[in-house]
Amino acid sequence: MAAAPAKGTAAQAPHRVAVAGASGRMGHMLIEAIRASGDCQLAGALDVPSSPAIGNDAAAFLGHASGVPVTADLQAGLSQAQVLIDFTRPEGTLAHLRACRERRVNAVIGTTGFSEAQKQAIAEAARDIAIVMAPNMSVGVNVTLKLLQLAAQALATGYDIEIIEAHHRHKVDAPSGTALKMGEVIAQAVGRDLKECAVYAREGVTGERDPSTIGFSTIRGGDIVGDHTVLFAGTGERIEITHKSSSRATYAQGSLRAVRFLAGRRSGLFDMFDVLGLR
């Protein structure tokens, strides 16, 4: 028999969460994590109209019935939700965000590949709802970002900086949002502007490496979930800081931490440093 709440307290209501891209790989991982959590409840499941999962129970792939059908109707999919988790595409995320703003549903955004104008639209939406947006929801990746900040400050001169990332063959943007975030963190730590110092491609006779640049290398193949290495190459030594993901489960768990962080917040734009207290 479950223990009764302590006198003077009430059992906390679960966080009601909707998932965008519910029939995709990340959507399935999120639904599984929500089901396994003790404090979150699946309240909506969104997907594109062409998805064969439309109309099916969102947890059918687990062999369970959640009572939540997969729908392409944004209003229906968000009607019972307090927060939406979105790992889709930029255009889809912005459409979802407009519906969230209308219904005052908070959002956790793990989508990458946004343009500057699209990022500005997200910041504008955060005036009315609370949003956590991060290119990578993994707790480990965000701790790695903090380590990179410290390393870059100490290695600001005399070290060439290169960022190497690898992902599965289906990833459509490059470099990855995580790699770009690493570059932004490093550039800020050493007093540079990533837009001015990033080098995304090298071919032919390139000349000597400009020591003020930050280089990016991209690998796409197989089913690599996500590998990122930052190389600080000095004279006589190299420092490498690496994070490797073997499962999307870490992104799902980080997303649920973001959901909990947003509870009770009504507006504002946050990232995983805020969620994890790494400021």
Image (spheres, grey):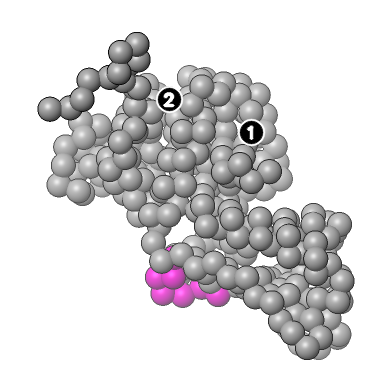
Q: Residue extending furthest left?
A: 1
Q: Tell me whether the residue at label 2 lies in contact with that at label 1, contact meaning CB atoms closer than 8 angstroms.
A: no
**Residue 213, quarter of the rendered image:** bottom right
Q: At 66% from the left edge and 60% from the top edge, which residue is drawn?
A: 147
Question: Of helix, strand and loop, which one carries label 2?
Answer: loop
Residues in magenta, as a range: 219-225
Locate the N terminus and report the quarter of the image it occupies: top left
* Residue 250 appears left or right of 10: right
Which of 133 and 203 lies nearest the eye of the viewer? 133
Where residue 175 appears, as percent x and y from the top left, is 62, 64
Q: Is residue 44 above or below residue 109?
A: above
Question: The disc labelled 1 sits on which kind of residue?
Answer: Leu
Above or below: residue 215 compared with residue 181: below
Give the labeled residue for mark 1.
269
Q: Upstream in the sequence, badge 2 or badge 1?
A: 2
Determine if residue 49 is in view: no
Circle 2 crowding by C-alpha within 10 Å: few under 14, some 14–19, many from 20: many
| Image spot of residue 60 (x, y percent) | 19, 44
Residue 196 is situated, as x and y percent measured from the top left of the image, at 84, 61
**Residue receiving disc 2:** 82
Residue at position x 60%, y 24% from top? 267
- Placement of the C terminus among the 4 image quadrants: top right
Q: Is residue 2 left or right of residue 102?
A: left
Say which quarter of the image contains residue 25.
Answer: bottom left
Mark 2–mark 1 distance (CA, rounded to whole Å): 16 Å
- Residue 64 location, quadrant: top left
Q: Foreground residue, 147 or 267?
A: 147
Is 66 magenta? The answer is no
Callout 1 crowding tier (Cα within 10 Å): few <14, some 14–19, many ≥20? some
